[in-house]
Image (spheres, helix red, strand yellow):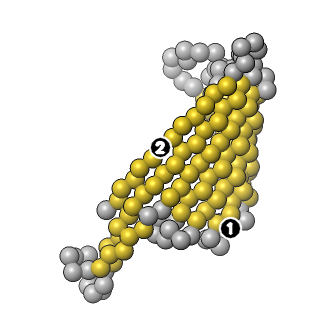
């Protein structure tokens, strides 16, 4: 059995003059969960009402900021931190700076570097470089491509 709750907020600032080519966005999201895991205590291969259970209450959040320096160019950074689902005494943290370039309202390229710190030795110290390309198919967006994406 699992229950998850979340709350998020963001704020956008644009100057009165030159607001089409500069802006700042900040935001965040907080997650809180409660998980109940059944344990096959009699080792019969089935989970039944006589078996034990344990609970975890992991918490996680993400916070981010993005600045627009020209119509097509955005720089941002994101911080993620979350407890492990099966053990809320352990966690994983990530820092991800990125740059986004909007070539048109239909095409965006983003490059990012992600650094991970984790209580899981397989993830701890992980450094990942990613490139993302988004292409919009279909109806034209309602705003020009330089408006706060």
Residue 15 visible in rendering: yes
Q: Position of residue 92 (x, y in %)?
A: 61, 62
Which residue is at a point 52% across and 49% down the rendered structure image? Answer: 30
Task: Please report the residue visible at 55 percent of the width from the left and 17 percent of the height from the top.
Answer: 141
53 in relation to 127, above or below: below
Q: Residue furthest right?
A: 69
In the picture shown, does residue 133 fall above or below 59?
above
Q: How dense is the environment of label 1, judged by Cα within 10 Å: few (below 14), some, or many (20 and up)?
A: some
The residue under the point 70% across, 48% down is 96
| The N terminus, quarter of image | bottom left
Q: Is residue 126 above or below residue 89?
A: above
Disc 1 is placed on an element classified as: loop
Residue 121 in percent (x, y) is at: 65, 73
The answer to whether 28 is drawn above or below residue 33 in the figure is above
Q: Quadrant of residue 15?
A: top right
Res 53 quadrant in image:
bottom left
Residue 33 drawn at (x, y percent): 42, 57
Q: How many marks?
A: 2
Q: Is residue 82 left or right of residue 58?
A: right
Helix, strand or loop under label 2: strand
Residue assigned mark 1: 124
Q: CA distance from mark 1 to mark 2?
A: 28 Å
Instruction: Say whether residue 100 is visible.
Output: no
Q: Which residue in the protein does label 2 denote?
A: 7
């Amino acid at each position: 059995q699992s229950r998850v709750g979340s709350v998020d907020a963001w704020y956008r600032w644009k100057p009165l003059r030159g607001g089409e080519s500069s802006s700042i966005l900040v935001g965040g999201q907080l997650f809180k969960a409660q998980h109940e895991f059944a344990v096959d205590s009699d080792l019969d291969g089935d989970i039944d009402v006589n078996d034990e259970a344990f609970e975890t209450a992991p918490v996680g959040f993400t916070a981010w900021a993005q600045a627009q320096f020209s119509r097509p160019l955005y720089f941002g950074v994101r911080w993620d931190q979350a407890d492990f689902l099966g053990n809320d005494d352990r966690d994983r943290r990530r820092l991800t700076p990125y740059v986004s370039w909007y070539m048109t309202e239909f095409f965006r390229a983003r490059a990012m570097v992600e650094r991970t710190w984790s209580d899981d030795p397989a993830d701890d110290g992980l450094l990942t470089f990613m490139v993302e390309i988004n292409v919009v198919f279909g109806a034209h967006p309602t705003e020009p491509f330089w408006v706060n994406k």
